[in-house]
Amino acid sequence: MTGTLCQQFLQAMTWLKTKLDVRYDIEGTGSQPRKELWEIPVTAIKEAIINALAHKDYSGGVPIQISVYKDKIIIWNEGQLPENWTVKNLLEKHASRPYNPDIANALFRSGYIESWGRGTIKIIRECKQAGIPEPVFSYDSSDISVEFRMDIYNEKYLQSLNLSDRQVKAVFYAKDKGKITNSEYQRLNDCSRNTASNDLMELVEKDLLKPSGQKGAGAFYTLK
C-alpha cells in the first residue's frame, strides 16, 4: 500500500472489509439506519492499525504486516514498547508514550486518534462487546502484534464442515453452557449413547471440541 499514512490506513481498512463477513441489524423502522455487525469489530481493527502506524519503527523499512486467516487476523509491526513496559501495561489504563510522537500527534489532529493511551483498552472492550474472544497482544524486543480471533463457532462455518444437525446443536450447546457431557448430548438429540460417543469423537477429530481427560460420569467436552 502506498501514499500518506492516512491514505495507507484507509486502503488497509477497505481491503480488510473485503475479507470479513458482515450481517445487518435493522434499528427501528423507516429512515432509521441499519447497524453493521462485523465478525471482528472494525472499530477495534481501526485502533490496531492506528497503533501500528504510531508505534512502528520506520528505520528498518519493514512494512506493517496484516495476515488474514480463516479464523484470525494478525497485525504486526516492528517497534518497541517504552522501557520496562510489558504487554500487561497495554491491558490496563496507561500513559500515552508513542514511539513516534510526531506521527501520533498528526493522527490525533486528523481525528484518527480519539484519546491518548486508550487504544488497546478500546480494542479489548469492542471485542468483548461483540462476543468474540479477547485479542492477544504479543511483544518481544523488536516487534509488536495483536491477534484478533474470530468466533468460528457459527452456523456458516459449522455447515462448511458437513456436520450433522445433532453435532451443530451440540457445539452451540457447549458454547452456551461452557461444556457438554455424553448424557447431555443424548438428551439434547434424543439419541443413543453409542451415537453420542461417535458424534462427539468426530467433533474432537475436527478440532471443534476437546475432551476433559476425565473418565466415566465426570467426563465432558469443551470448545477447542
Image (cartoon, rainbow, N blue to C red):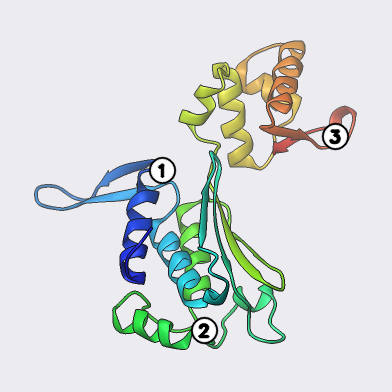
Q: Which mark is residue 19?
A: 1
Q: Position of residue 83 (x, y in %)?
A: 69, 87
Dot 2 falls on a residue whose secondary structure is: loop
> What residue is shown at x 75% (from left), y 35% (from top)?
210
Dot 1 falls on a residue whose secondary structure is: loop
The answer to which of marks 2 and 3 sits earlier in the sequence is: 2
> What residue is shown at x 52% (from left), y 84% (from top)?
98
Q: Kindly indicate whether the residue at mark 1 contacts the one at mark 2 (C-beta within 8 angstroms).
A: no
Q: Position of residue 89 (x, y in %)?
A: 64, 79
Residue 182 in which image quadrant: top right
Disc 3 target residue? 218
In the image as oriented, which residue stretches furthest toward the left?
30
Quadrant occupied by the N terminus: bottom left
In the image as oriented, which residue stretches furthest toward the right?
215
Would residue 118 appear left or right of 134 to someone viewing this image?
left
Residue 47 in which image quadrant: bottom left
- The amino acid on which the numbered mark 1 sits, given as a three-letter code, is Lys
Of the pair 173 and 41, the residue shown nearer to us: 41
Q: Indicate whether 161 appears above or below 25.
A: above
Of the pair 209 and 67, the residue shown nearer to us: 67
Q: Which mark is residue 39?
A: none
Dot 3 falls on a residue whose secondary structure is: helix
Marks 2 and 1 sit apart, C-alpha to C-alpha, by 29 Å
The answer to which of marks 2 and 1 sits earlier in the sequence is: 1
Disc 2 target residue? 98
Marks 1 and 3 sit apart, C-alpha to C-alpha, by 41 Å
- The amino acid on which the numbered mark 3 sits, given as a three-letter code, is Gly
Task: State which mark lies toward you, 1 or 3.
Answer: 1
> What residue is shown at x 33% (from left), y 41% (from top)?
23
**Mark 1, other Cα within 10 Å: few <14 / some 14–19 / many ≥20:** few
- The amino acid on which the numbered mark 2 sits, given as a three-letter code, is Pro
